[in-house]
Image (cartoon, rainbow, N blue to C red):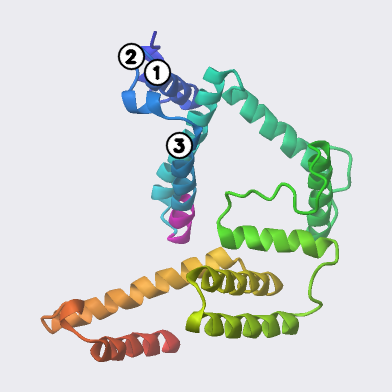
Amino acid sequence: MQNKDLIHNPNGGVARLLEIMRCLRDPDTGCPWDIEQDFSTIAPYTIEEAYEVADAIEREAWEELKGELGDLLFQSVFHAQMASEAGYFTFDDVADTMSDKMVARHPHVFGDEDRDKSAEQQTRDWETIKAAERAGKKQTGTLDGVAIGLPALLRAMKLQKRAARVGFDWPDISHVLDKMVEEARELVEASADLPKARIEEELGDLLFVMANLARHLDIDPEAALRHANAKFVRRFEFIETELSKRGKRPEDSNLQEMDALWDQIRGRDKVD
């Protein structure tokens, strides 16, 4: 039975959202699409919503961010409702687990530890606490617990950070650059006559080294690539605009003309 007063209460907060989700999943009166979903079918939407949050932040679209955070929250509510139906846990369990984790990981805020420490020391303490948590889950390997579902570049960086903590790391960036040149050369050689699977392997090796380079430069490779994507979109839109002034579309042009326009906007970017 629906709690209609709560469902239509504009100030119902999280309780309202939980009730809406429960009703959507009701096997007798709910939405057929929502009822048919499971963890695996919803997971891609969860990832997509997280990226849309990041996109709104990147564009500083704060009003949009409110909606995107709501979409991401709804994903957590959806998963929690399915878990509740299966008898695994409830949304309150999710919230309590997160609260317990934050309290345990911040003894300098919620406990007796001294708060007067550097950001670097806090990071080391955080990693020590997380290592203890992994040990409690019997994740004793250095690379255990790095989520497989992470974006590949981000996961590569996290794997490398874990390995670096136990001393498996190049001493300085010059070694990374040398390795990048080596992997690029191997990719060129592979692309000449080797099977596609080998070419893919060599490309993966090069991307892995690029993630390592980003780590040594203290740069988020995902953020760097997002910025590059945004720059490409902006520059290509300039090409389309300029071609439109000439009564053309890109397919009516040629590489030489479009490349000249690309150089034009690229030159403006350098001046700016």
Q: Secondary structure at mark 2?
A: loop
122 horizontally vs 67: left or right: right
- Would you name the residue on which mark 2 appears? 29
User: Is residue 26 placed above or below 40 in the rendered structure?
Assistant: above
User: Is residue 6 placed above or below 161 in the rendered structure?
Assistant: above
Q: Secondary structure at mark 3?
A: helix
Label whose residue precedes the other's in the sequence (1 or 2): 1
Nearer the viewer's eye, disc 3 or disc 1? 3
Q: CA distance from mark 3 to mark 1?
A: 17 Å
Q: Which residues are magenta?
A: 53-59
The amino acid beneath tag 2 is Thr
Query: Is residue 255 visible to us here?
Result: yes
Mark 3 in CB contact with mark 1 (< 8 angstroms): no
- Would you name the residue on which mark 3 appears? 42
- Residue 23 — which label? 1
Q: Is residue 41 magenta?
A: no
- Residue 14 — which label? none
111 horizontally vs 215: left or right: right
Query: Is residue 106 visible to us here?
Result: no
Q: Residue 106 placed where, x, y %?
A: 78, 43
Q: CA distance from mark 2 to mark 3?
A: 20 Å
Mark 1 in CB contact with mark 2 (< 8 angstroms): yes
Q: Residue at x 39, y 90 (%)?
A: 267
Residue closest to the eye, 56 or 45: 45
219 horizontally vs 272: left or right: right
- Bin the neighbour count of mark 3 within 10 Å (Cα to Cα): few under 14, some 14-19, many 20 and up: some
Q: Residue at x 43, y 54 (%)?
A: 56
Q: Residue at x 41, y 74 (%)?
A: 231
Q: Residue 13 placed where, x, y %?
A: 47, 26
The amino acid beneath tag 3 is Ile
Residue closest to the eye, 97 or 111: 97
Residue 218: image quadrant is bottom right
